[in-house]
Image (cartoon, rainbow, N blue to C red):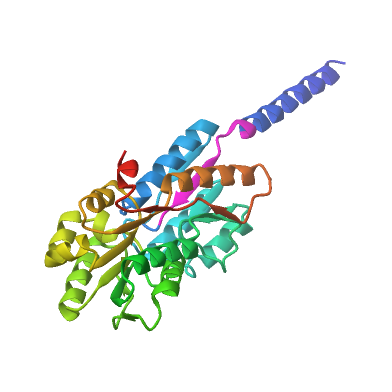
Amino acid sequence: MKSTTFLLAAGVVSLSTAALTVSNAADKQRVFALVPKTISVPFYNDVERGCAEEAKKIGVQAKFTGPTTADAAQQVQVLQDLVSQGVDGIAVAPMDADSVIGVISQARKKGIPVITFDSDSPKADRIAFVGTNNLGAGEEGGKAFKNLLPKGKFAIITGGLAAANLNDRIKGFREFVNSENYTEVAGSPFACNDDASKAIQIIQDVLTRNPDLNGFFFSGGWPLFGAPEAYLKAIGKRVADIKNKTFVVVSFDTLTEELKLLKGGYCNVLIGQRPYAMGVKSIDILNELADKKSVPPIVDTGVDVVDSSNVDQFLK
């Protein structure tokens, strides 16, 4: 009888331990990782703020991590480390659309949901994309450029030549300024690899080689938010032409430094994305996927067109 009692008691202990283990697993805080192209680009500061605030709001942990420079191989290594750690979900902005295909596949095979944000990798096994409709936003840039400059010679400065989001913006822009009324300089688009100082050097070189240039399109705001003083020096005597709209500068992004330059008349139009919303929506989508819910394949965070008529509103 004593033996039977002992076995029953042991069974109760065993069941209690198992229940405690299940309870602890259920209480374990989810960890979602957001991986930008590089943590050194100011554009992603608002993405980080958005994901951190949303994570705190819904009770999960946001791990914002990425390469220190715009290096596709380094980004893949960061992703591989996250897969090894077994995070509960990953959102990545691919530096190179094709370079992340393999590691996204690895993550999915381990049961880790993966989405992209800001920049997509359409061929990868990602579940959804959160960010700007880059083709449409590029078209907005092209419309603005064409309205200000009906004809002329232009150059495009971009980040990485393999970035899907930037290539879509360029494609959209060219739909409006790729006619007999416009000439795109040889070598354009020029890649700065998300490096502000390199973007400044490209501006100087292009202006030197093309004194008859009529404008620039920046598919990202590197020369404006990265080094505004250097940008003003590089543009030099063309500042007066920008103010009277005989030289046109249309750029992506609406960071504070860029808005101040627009307010001062040193560029003409900014195509604003909504990075904070990208951070918020990325966390929300990953959390829904962790709950085994279905999500839309595309989450469009919207776009803003900012010029001298509404720049004060955005500066506020």
Residue 63 occupies quadrant: top left
Q: Is residue 11 left or right of residue 212?
A: right
Please state the horizontal and vertical placement of residue 100, each as a whole percent of the image: 49, 65
Residue at image position (12%, 65%) is 236
Seen from the viewer's position, the closer of residues 45 and 301 is 301
Looking at the rendering, in which quadrant would you find the N terminus?
top right
Seen from the viewer's position, the closer of residues 100 and 308 is 308
Looking at the rendering, in which quadrant would you find the C terminus?
top left
Please state the horizontal and vertical placement of residue 77, each as a whole percent of the image: 43, 60
Please state the horizontal and vertical placement of residue 217, each as a whole percent of the image: 32, 67
Residue at image position (43%, 66%) is 169
Residue 211 position (above or below residue 120): below
Residue 72 visible in the shown view: no
- Would residue 18 be counted in the magenta stretch? no
Residue 3 occupies quadrant: top right
Residue at image position (21%, 55%) is 265
Residue 177 visible in the shown view: yes
Residue range corresponding to the magenta coloring: 25-36
Residue at image position (55%, 35%) is 29
Q: Is residue 79 left or right of residue 5?
A: left
Seen from the viewer's position, the closer of residues 184 and 187 is 184
Q: How many marks?
A: 0
Residue that sits furthest to the right in the current view: 1
Please state the horizontal and vertical placement of residue 273, each as a whole percent of the image: 42, 52
